[in-house]
Amino acid sequence: MTLQDVANYIRSILDEPSQTILTDNDFLYYARQSLWKVYDLITQTGFPYYLTKTEISVSKGTNEYSLPSDFGKIDDVIFEDYHLVQANQYTTMEGTPEYYVVTENSILLFPIPDEDGTLTVYYHKKPTPPAQLSDTINIPELAERLFILDMLIQCATKGGYDTSPWLQQYLIEERNFKGQLMRDGSLIRVQKRGF
């Protein structure tokens, strides 16, 4: 599904074939907003659509490591065979890492590693927002309806339309979407991660 497909569909529903009210830039802006909203729903439920991993070589005495440029949200962090817990405090002690803190583009391990090892970071990649209308929207097929409804509500709001019917439809769809992801996500997550 391209953003142009979504724009054409929304323009037909709102009877707005010209670009008088809704410009291409509006659609690009609303698409970014809707994409992040769907991304948050997907990652909150643990559905592994954007899930990937990176392995980082850990050196004794060094506790800060860069995260990949496509890093979005942490799913799990493992040092050797130990699952680390997210923390909000720092320590200068040395030992086997038990905690981690994520900054904007790096991960810090605590206690500071007293041995070399491998850190495996499972994370949800950031989706790439469309740069032009011909771009494909990077979301799972099962989220397309939610994405379109969210964009429709934003566009209708700008056009001065009553959004209550679409908002009600969106809320029902969101509830069904979360339920579907919770049911299907666990099995797919296990398959994708290889547990």
Image (cartoon, grey):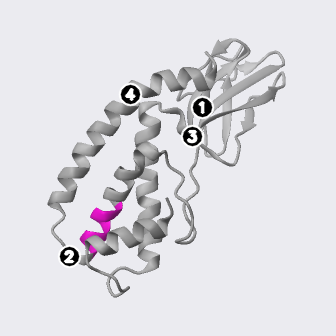
Q: Name the residue at 31% across, 57% down.
A: 149
Q: Nearer the viewer, mark 4 or mark 2?
A: 4
**SS of the residue at dot 2?**
loop
Which quadrant would the C terminus be assigned to in this image? top right
Q: What residue range appears in magenta?
A: 151-158
Q: CA distance from mark 4 to mark 3?
A: 15 Å
**SS of the residue at dot 3?**
helix
Q: CA distance from mark 3 to mark 1?
A: 21 Å
Front residue of 184/55: it is 184
Residue at mark 3: 50
Residue at mark 2: 160
Tell me which amino acid carries mark 1.
Val
Q: Quadrant of residue 163?
A: bottom left
Residue at mark 1: 101
Residue 155 in the magenta stretch? The answer is: yes
Q: Are marks 3 and 1 in contact (CB under 8 Å)?
A: no
Q: Is 128 rendered above or below residue 3?
A: above
Report x, y in % for residue 129. Answer: 55, 60
Residue at mark 4: 182
Q: Name the residue at 74% across, 35% down.
A: 65
Mark 4 closeness class: few <14, some 14–19, many ≥20 residues within 10 Å: some
Q: Is 95 rendered above or below residue 37?
A: above
